[in-house]
């Protein structure tokens, strides 16, 4: 008899520096794979731009296995977002609140992952809020409400494993209902 293991593919997205690599390394039980792949696209002038990809794994208490993928942040790699979205069961959007327009950043990922969000579940974690309290959590919630998107949004410092686990809990709770 073989025990059945349920696997969930979870994506982490967000701008460069939002904390995708940090979040996955904070909770992965295997040594996370973090690649900075060189960009060979000759139409892009900045030859050494990198495409950050991450992979980690986490087994839940019930034995389910989470496969954690970090997507490239830049929207011009959105073709990879589509590839990575296949079979995914949830999306964690990380926001860097120290950036010039975090609400516009949120829009980029809500739009870029619209199909995945419609099909599954999402959660938004707002980081670097110390010293950058604005926009506040309500502003993010209102932005999503206006777009008709229902993702829970919480402050999260992804350097803290507990915070990352809380974001995942919020995703998995949505999958159960
Ligand atoms: N001060 C502060 N730093 C944070 C917070 N969250 C993440 N960081 C830092 O922000 C950086 C995120 O980088 P990284 O994980 O490589 O981002 P990625 O490009 O999305 O993979 C790391 O240096 C983290 O330590 C936060 O809430 N506050
Ligand atoms: Mg990274």
Image: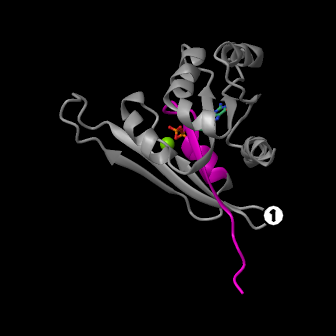
Residue 2 in the image: x percent, y percent?
A: 69, 83
* 140 with respect to 162 (left or right): left
Residue 125 in the image: x percent, y percent?
A: 69, 32
Q: Is residue 84 above or below residue 43?
A: below
Q: Is residue 73 above or below residue 54?
A: above
Identify which residue, 64 or 74, lies in the foreground: 64
Q: Quadrant of residue 40?
A: top left
The single residue placed furthest to the left in the displayed view is: 42
Question: Badge 1 is on which residue?
Answer: 61
Q: Is residue 67 above or below residue 70?
A: below
Residue 124 in the image: x percent, y percent?
A: 68, 31
Residue found 63% across the figure and 45% down from its top: 23
Find out whether residue 16 is within the magenta segment: yes
Q: Quadrant of the C terminus?
A: top right
Find out whether residue 8 is within the magenta segment: yes
Residue 113 in the image: x percent, y percent?
A: 53, 33
Residue found 46% across the figure and 34% down from its top: 73
Query: How many numbered marks appear?
Result: 1
Residue found 56% across the figure and 63% down from its top: 31
Identify which residue, 171 or 167, lies in the foreground: 171
Q: Quadrant of the N terminus?
A: bottom right
Q: Please, which colouring scheme is shown? A: one colour
Q: Give the crowd class for mark 1: few <14, some 14-19, many >=20 residues within 10 Å.
A: few
Residue found 76% across the figure and 67% down from its top: 63
Give the quadrant of ligand 1: top right
* 84 with respect to 40 (left or right): right
Q: Which region is colored magenta?
A: 1-26
Question: Is ligand 1 closer than 8 angstroms to the Cβ of mark 1?
Answer: no
Secondary element type, mark 1: loop
């Amino acid at each position: 008899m073989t025990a059945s293991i349920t696997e969930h593919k979870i994506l982490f997205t967000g701008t460069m520096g939002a904390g995708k690599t940090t979040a996955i390394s904070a909770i992965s039980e295997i040594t996370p794979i973090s690649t900075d792949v060189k960009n060979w696209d000759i139409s892009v002038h900045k030859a050494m731009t990198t495409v950050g990809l991450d992979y980690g794994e986490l087994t839940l208490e019930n034995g389910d296995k989470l496969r954690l993928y970090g997507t490239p942040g830049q929207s011009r790699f959105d073709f990879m977002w589509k590839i990575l979205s296949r079979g995914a069961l949830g999306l964690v959007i990380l926001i860097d609140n120290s950036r010039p327009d975090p609400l516009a950043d949120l829009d980029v990922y809500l739009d870029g992952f619209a199909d995945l969000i419609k099909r599954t579940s999402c959660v938004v974690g707002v980081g670097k809020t110390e010293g950058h309290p604005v926009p506040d959590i309500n502003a993010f919630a209102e932005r999503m409400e206006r777009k008709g998107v229902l993702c829970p949004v919480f402050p999260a410092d992804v350097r803290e494993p507990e915070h990352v686990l809380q974001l995942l809990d919020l995703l998995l709770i949505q999958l159960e209902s």
